[in-house]
Amino acid sequence: MKCPYCGHLDNRVIDSRLNKDKTITRRRRACSACQQRFTTYERIEVMLPMLVKKDGRREPWDRGKIVAGLEKACEKLPVSMADIDRFVDNIERKLQDVGGKEVPTSRIGEWVMAALPDLDEVAYVRFASVYRQFKDVNEFMDELKIFLGKKEQEE
């Protein structure tokens, strides 16, 4: 691991801890050259299926893209980064469970749409407005009516 302060490659691990879900290892390290301390995070790299876009292009899974979309949808809402990370972890687990070599991005979008109301309802509306690409206000209102109908059935 390269020291972020001096660039030296030799360092030692001072402390290691797992996160609550036991999926990420946090390590405190000390550089052997400059003695500065820094933190690294380790996550298991799993081979996820390729994503098939609407236009047929294929691209690898990019966790950062979905995190960025959720951050935008949750902007100025009481949703923590830890909540977003757990949410994306669940999506990644579903991707692993699919088991195929390719998954359409529309399926991932539907997984997000199905789970997002549990994270935050306003974030759901924001995400839906971008994901569904409504052509006019009436389409948006129809989506809200469906959402509210599902919510009433749950209560």
Image: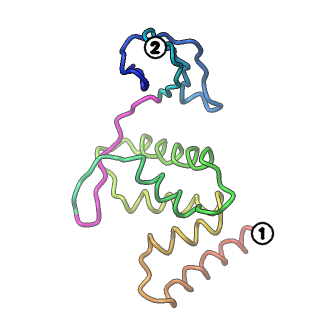
**Mark 2 lies on residue:** 34
Reply above or below: 31 against 137.
Answer: above
Q: Which residue is labeled 1 in the image? A: 155
Magenta segment, prevailing SS (helix, strand or loop)? loop
Q: Residue 11, percent across and down?
A: 44, 11
Q: Nearer the viewer, residue 136 or 50?
A: 136
- Residue 11 placement, left or right of 23: left
Q: For the point 61% across and 21% down, which residue is it?
A: 17
- Closer to the eye: label 2 or 1: 2
The part of the image, by quadrant, that contains residue 114 is bottom right
Local secondary structure at mark 1: loop
Labelled pair 2, 1 in contact (Cβ < 8 Å) = no
Q: Amino acid at mark 1?
A: Glu
Q: Amino acid under label 2?
A: Cys
Residue 153 vertical placement versus 51 (above, below): below
Q: Is residue 123 above or below residue 62?
A: below
The region drawn magenta spans 43-55
Q: Residue at x 58, y 44 (%)?
A: 86
Q: Which mark is residue 134?
A: none
The answer to if 122 sits in the magenta stretch is no
The residues bearing labels 2 and 1 have C-alpha atoms spaced at a distance of 60 Å
Residue at x-position 52% and y-position 43%: 89
* Figure quadrant of residue 121: bottom right
Q: Position of residue 46 (x, y in %)?
A: 39, 33
Q: Judging from the image, what secondary structure is the residue with disc 2 in?
A: loop
Count residues near mark 2 (Cα–Cα under 10 Å), then give few for <14, some for 14-19, many for 20+.
few
Measured from the top left, where is residue 113 in percent x and y? 53, 64
Q: Quadrant of residue 74?
A: bottom right
